[in-house]
Image (spheres, rainbow, N blue to C red):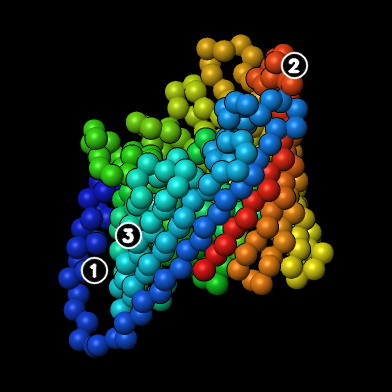
């Protein structure tokens, strides 16, 4: 069934690209990106070891540290175009392994259908690789354990004003430069008015994951984001839920909280470890482009997974981060 879906998508792609357009559309080139850096210190553990940090991606080294530089160039001519998204620095290297964060071509088949071919960031989850797209600077356990990127082909359909659908076929999850073993993953996303149900099946990699991402405006100034996920690969996986309440006190300052429960699962382990992580973040926008984010984070595990200032095993870790993000 999976092979049939792959052949169908590739055949459809070939037919669509074979159509000729006799017009001469306007060419459009855009350029943007971001840079970020941060300071991090443990409040309840020593700071002479950079590895004393939550087991999540990025923002995990002590003292003054670099995030990443992000350069995005896009070109569009009529219905077709391409995007090259380059990353540099520790955050980009940890997420992408190479400088190519994204590299894809696209074809707007119609007003309601878009075909994308290449490497692109994952559609699962609430958070993304670039700190510009996240409210909290540090990342969640759900984000860190899910996929980062896919290489393959996907088709996005705008079914109505409220409904959308994405179908795709990819290489093994996060194996983005080539296909090492001939295995493929299939994915889908159903969207309704800003709420998304995401599915991924990757037998050779992550296994099966179902993910819900959404949120709602409780008032003009108060927003609550939601992310929940469950993943399983032959008895091993994880599940969890994140809540993201955010309150805007002014046009330039917003305060937000990420409350997360995350648990791994393994059929060979009697007591699967879990963690509750609370992250309080302030976001101050300076002149539209520079964002300053002070952040307090407390991680509390079901087991002694951290150490305290006396070098004794403990269940919790408190830390402070101050980040600066410039977008252009």
Identify the mark at residue 2; answer none if there is no mark: none
* Of the two numbered discs 2 and 1 in the rendering, the one whose residue sits closer to the viewer: 2
For mark 3, does the 10 Å Cα neighbourhood hold few (<14), some (14 to 19), or many (20 or more) residues? some
Point out residue 29 in the picture as x, y percentages from the top left corner.
36, 76
Task: Report which residue position mark 2 lands on.
Answer: 310
Q: Is residue 131 above or below residue 318?
A: below
Name the image quarter holding residue 70.
bottom left
Tell me the residue at 47%/63% (across/down): 33
Tell me the residue at 27%/55% (across/down): 9
Q: Which SS class for mark 3?
A: strand
Q: Is residue 132 above or below residue 271?
A: below
Task: Report which residue position mark 3 lands on.
Answer: 104
Of the two numbered discs 2 and 1 on the same chain, state the one appearing first in sequence.
1
Q: Left of 42 or right of it: where is 107?
A: left
Q: Is residue 223 visible?
A: no
Position of the N terminus, as image quadrant, is top left
Q: CA distance from mark 1 to mark 3?
A: 17 Å
Q: Which SS class for mark 1?
A: helix
Q: CA distance from mark 2 to mark 1?
A: 65 Å
Of the two numbered discs 2 and 3 on the same chain, state the one appearing first in sequence.
3
Task: Report which residue position mark 1 lands on.
Answer: 16
Q: Is residue 157 above or below residue 317?
A: below
Point out residue 238 in the picture as x, y percentages from the top left corner.
56, 29
Q: Nearer the viewer, residue 283 or 40?
A: 40
Name the image quarter holding residue 218.
bottom right
């Amino acid at each position: 069934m999976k092979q049939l879906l792959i052949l169908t998508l590739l055949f459809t792609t070939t037919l669509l690209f074979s159509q000729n357009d006799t017009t001469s559309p306007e060419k459009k080139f855009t350029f943007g990106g971001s840079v970020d850096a941060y300071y991090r210190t443990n409040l309840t553990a020593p700071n002479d070891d950079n590895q004393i940090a939550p087991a999540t991606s990025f923002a995990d080294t002590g003292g003054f540290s670099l995030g990443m530089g992000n350069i995005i160039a896009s070109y569009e001519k009529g219905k077709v175009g391409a995007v090259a998204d380059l990353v540099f620095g520790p955050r980009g290297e940890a997420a992408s392994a190479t400088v190519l964060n994204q590299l894809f071509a696209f074809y707007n088949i119609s007003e309601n259908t878009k075909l994308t071919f290449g490497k692109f960031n994952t559609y699962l989850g609430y958070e993304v690789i670039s700190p510009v797209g996240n409210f909290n600077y540090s990342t969640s356990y759900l984000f860190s354990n899910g996929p980062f990127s896919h290489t393959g082909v996907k088709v996005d359909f705008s079914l109505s004003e409220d409904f959308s659908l994405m179908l795709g076929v990819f290489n093994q999850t996060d194996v983005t430069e080539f296909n090492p073993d001939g295995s493929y993953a299939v994915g889908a996303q159903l969207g309704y008015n800003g709420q998304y149900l995401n599915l991924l099946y990757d037998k050779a990699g992550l296994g099966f994951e179902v993910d819900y991402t959404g949120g709602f405006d409780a008032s003009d100034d108060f927003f609550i984001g939601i992310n929940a996920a469950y993943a399983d690969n032959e008895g091993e996986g994880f599940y969890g839920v994140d809540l993201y309440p955010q309150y805007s006190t002014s046009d330039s300052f917003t305060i937000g909280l990420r409350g997360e429960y995350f648990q791994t699962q393994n059929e060979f382990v009697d007591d699967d470890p879990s963690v509750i992580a609370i992250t309080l973040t302030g976001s101050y926008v300076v002149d539209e482009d520079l964002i300053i984010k002070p952040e307090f984070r407390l991680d509390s595990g079901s087991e002694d997974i951290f150490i305290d200032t006396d070098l004794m095993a403990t269940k919790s870790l408190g830390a402070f981060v101050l980040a600066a993000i410039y977008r252009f």
